[in-house]
Amino acid sequence: MASEQTATGYIQHHLQNLAYGKLPAGYERVDAEGGTTVLENATWTLAHTAQEAADMGFMAVHLDTLGWSLFLGVLFSFLFHRAAKNATTGVPSGLQSFVEMVVEFIDNTVKDTFHHSSKIVAPMALTIFVWVFFMNAMDLIPIDWLPMVAQQVTGDSHLFFKVVPTTDPNATLGMALGVFVLMIGYSIKNKGIGGFMGELALHPFNHPVMIPFNLFLEVVGLIAKPISLALRLFGNLYAGEMIFILIALLYSAGLVWGLGGGLLQLGWAIFHILVIALQAFVFMVLTTVYMAMAHDVDESH
């Protein structure tokens, strides 16, 4: 695949999502042969180029991100449900041992971080950790394999197909906003609207004159939480994917460079396993910390 186009085109192709959106009437579409087609009516369609994806605007949907996210979420639910259903007090199976190890690890981490009573925090932490880990782990699949399969199945040799959901900021920001909504909701539930607004208006300086300054600081800090949570995960996985793409380019540069690329890919994949697990853990821990802050009634922060 790398040998069929320029290095720049290869990189850009792998960084583009499979976007589905609406193009306006009169839009000029450029096909693979360089010809143009003018749309008579506004049309919902798949983007053929990165420019078309951009022109679709905010309402465009990344089908690959949504598809793989849902598939991995269902896979996680299936595996853990099967392990729970077939659990035994005797010698556990490999799947049961793995699930028990993960559940115990998450449970201990939540107990160390969240010192309140809640039926949602531990299951949410488990879901976030495993789901994000599964999405991150897609980065370990050789960069061309699944896109080439998708192109063969659809018959479209120019099909965009990203398989790592966490390299799409829409996915990471969506998860972070979900956490943010829960944090705000539980803050208001546990502290009341007055207590929640009091935290924003009276900290760090507990004086009426400083309320505007306090609000500015606290609101900026509050908004920064989901943004930093999303961008941290996205940035690390995006960088990892970019390195895999650059290594893949070596395979089209001859046998010697190809062998070197194979060794580099193996080495980076082994190291990247740590990044994959660490980023899932960080996202889970920060979520738990934010939920603990939402339950802290007597403490300022």
Image (cartoon, rainbow, N blue to C red):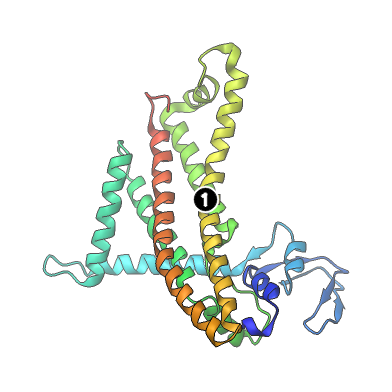
Q: Quadrant of the N terminus?
A: bottom right
The secondary structure type at the circle numbered 1 is helix
View extreme (front): residue? 256
Horizontal side of residue 250 vs 109, given as left or right: right
Instruction: Give the residue at mark 1.
Output: 232
How many residues crowd mark 1 within 10 Å: few (<14), some (14–19), many (20+)?
some
Q: Residue at x 52, y 63 (%)?
A: 240
Q: Amino acid at mark 1?
A: Arg
Quadrant of the rendered structure where residue 269 is? bottom left
Question: Front-most of 10 and 159?
Answer: 10
Instruction: Tell me residue 49's x, y (percent).
Output: 74, 72
Horizontal side of residue 177 vs 22, given as left or right: left
Confirm whether residue 84 shows in the render: no
View extreme (left): residue? 90
Q: Residue at x 55, y 55 (%)?
A: 235
Q: Residue at x 57, y 22 (%)?
A: 214
Picture layout, residue 91 above or below residue 289: below
